[in-house]
Amino acid sequence: MPQDDRKLTLALLVLAMLLAGRVFMVENPQHNPWAPLDLNDPRGWATSTKLDALRGDPAACQAVLARSDVAFTALPATGEGECQRQDRLTLGTMPFAPRFPEMTCSVAAGMEMWLEQDVQPLAEELLGSRVARVEQLGTFSCRRMYGGETGRWSEHATGNAIDIAGFVLQDGRRIRLLRDWDGDDAEGRFLEKVRDAACRSFGTVLSPDYNAAHADHFHFDQGRRPGFGACR
Ligand SMILES: [Zn+2]
């Protein structure tokens, strides 16, 4: 019966599409929302959602670092009140200056992905040299936002944020936000592109475009603040 033939053809077509979809998902775990996150995989449709899910879940996050062959040292809980930190670690491998700071696991995972998949390729493409050091201004600081006496606590109060002032390239050049942001040159384009890319690795990204308080640094954090999540 032609009617039955059409039904069979349709069923086979749907089956073939399902099989092709399954093969695609196995070969491209970065697009598969159910595949475990590996920070070495290229970015895909599901990557930002998976990074987002690590916020506030140190155990799941540390499993991702281990799976991704990122060496880390988990540190014991410390502090009290609003500045209590249960989620602290250091990574030995990231090229930070003046030193590798303590941070939450989800900030570390975001940094790893941002540095390896965005910063280094963009530095090579636009500046012709890889980044040797990331100049950081700090992660942990027990204070409210903008150091006020009242108001919301900063993500820095729990080490769930990092401030970055610039980069030193392998060829010795130094890129600084205070001087090079908004420049109509390769350095300016590099800074703008790494800022844009950071929005895929961090919950909140603030740059000199956000306000004068950020004229000399990027602020990245992994806070869970519904409706906040700025990327500017
Ligand atoms: Zn900050």
Image: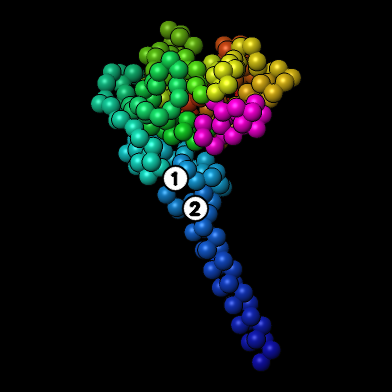
**Badge 1: few (under 14), some or many (20 or more) residues near its Cα, within 10 Å?**
many
Q: Which residue is located at x 56 percent, y 18 percent?
A: 172
SS state under label 1: loop
Give the labeled residue for mark 1. Answer: 38
Q: Is residue 134 above or below residue 61?
A: above
Q: Which residue is located at x 59 percent, y 17 percent?
A: 173
The image position of residue 175, as x and y in percent, is 60, 17
Tell me the quarter of the image containing the C terminus.
top right
* Residue type at numbered disc 1: Asp
- First-in-chain label (2 vs 1): 2
Q: Is residue 122 magenta?
A: yes
Residue 63 in view in this figure: yes
Asked whether mark 2 lies closer than 8 Å to ligand 1, one says: no
Disc 2/disc 1 C-alpha distance (Å): 9 Å
Q: Is residue 202 magenta?
A: no
The numbered disc on residue 29 is: 2
Is the Cβ of the residue at disc 2 closer than 8 Å to that at disc 1? Answer: yes
Q: How many marks overall?
A: 2
The image position of residue 1, as x and y in percent, is 66, 92
View extreme (front): residue: 171
Q: Is residue 164 above or below residue 48?
A: above
The image position of residue 198, as x and y in percent, is 56, 30
Q: Which residue is located at x 51 percent, y 35 percent?
A: 116
Magenta range is 115-131
**Badge 2: few (under 14), some or many (20 or more) residues near its Cα, within 10 Å?**
many
* Residue type at numbered disc 2: Pro
View extreme (top): residue: 149
The image position of residue 94, as x and y in percent, is 43, 28
